[in-house]
Image: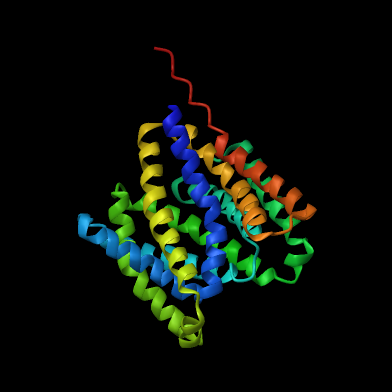
Amino acid sequence: MKPLDLLLGVVVVLIWGVNFVVAKIGVAEIPPILLMSMRFGVVAVLLLPFVRLPRGRMKGIAILSFSLGTVHFSFMFTAMKTLDAGTAAILTQIQVPFSTLLAALVFGERLGWVRAAGMGLAFAGVAIMLGEPRLTGNLLAAGFVIFAAFMWAVANIQIKALGPVDGFSLNAYLGLFAAPQLLGTSLLLESDHREALAQADWGAALFAVFYLGVMVQIVSYAIWYRLLRLYPVYQVMPLTLLVPVLGVVSGIVLRGEILTWPVVIGGAVTVAGVGLITLWRPASPAKPDT
């Protein structure tokens, strides 16, 4: 990988790592599901004038907007109200073994004993973290993150089934469909909107919406898709192992979060398991003699 592209890859995972701290800032000011509606609305407004209609794939994108946009982000950001940024950054890594397992079940992709061991390690690491005193009293929020990670894995299967779709078009129409769904969900499940909006620090709230919508959903994925086009997946994906590390570090540095041994040990085991899944490449089948 060229040095400039490697630097861009590091910038992307830095954006993703700090994302968890910014999420904490946002949900402290705006109800979480309403915040997500604003995020997707901003993405739709910014992208729709410049993208083509993905004909033949609108039904799939509409279904994806529910599983990914409404279900995943509603559970994930509701959990962020009470979970530490670093803890959430590690717990979300369980989406990798979920995605691997679903790909094996749905598409018949080869699992192999190395990836199976990685999945076992990842789940074991999460179990260790759930024994941390702060989490034992907050298991519902942790469960929300784990369920959100599962829904992210489901969304990955849906995206693969969609076939080739331009990333900007996908994000634009996801935003168009998801924003009103999330607004309706917020009005149904969240309360005191008027009071929350009146008391919000709008500087912090708008920064969170901008960062989550523009920096994460538009800028970082534009760079990431470019790297995936230029380089083999096995060269690009290992960079994602930095995300939980950066999430933990940014939580400590920017929010003063406390790192405990169960989180350290459980996080290390989880990342090690994810690393096995991400880095292991099945051997190519031997070609028959001719």
Residue 210 x, y percent position in the rendering: 41, 62
Give whichever of 135, 24 is nearer the camera. 24
Using the image as rendered, state which of residue 212 and residue 138 is in the foreground: 212
User: What's the residue at 47%, 64% (across, down)?
Assistant: 208
Q: Is residue 179 above or below residue 127?
A: below
Horizontal arrangement in the rendering, residue 155 relative to residue 250 (left or right): left
> Which residue shows up at 50% across the image and 61% down it?
151
Residue drawn at point x = 59 percent, y = 63 percent:
145
Residue at figure coordinates x 74%, y 71% from the top left: 137
Can the viewer see residue 158 in this picture?
no
Residue 237: x %, y % from top left = 50, 39
- Residue projecting furthest to the top: 290
Q: In this view, does 98 lie to the left or right of 259?
A: left
Q: Position of residue 159 (x, y in %)?
A: 38, 53
Total numbered labels: 0
Residue 145 to residue 248: above or below = below
Q: Is residue 278 visible in the rendered structure shown here?
A: yes
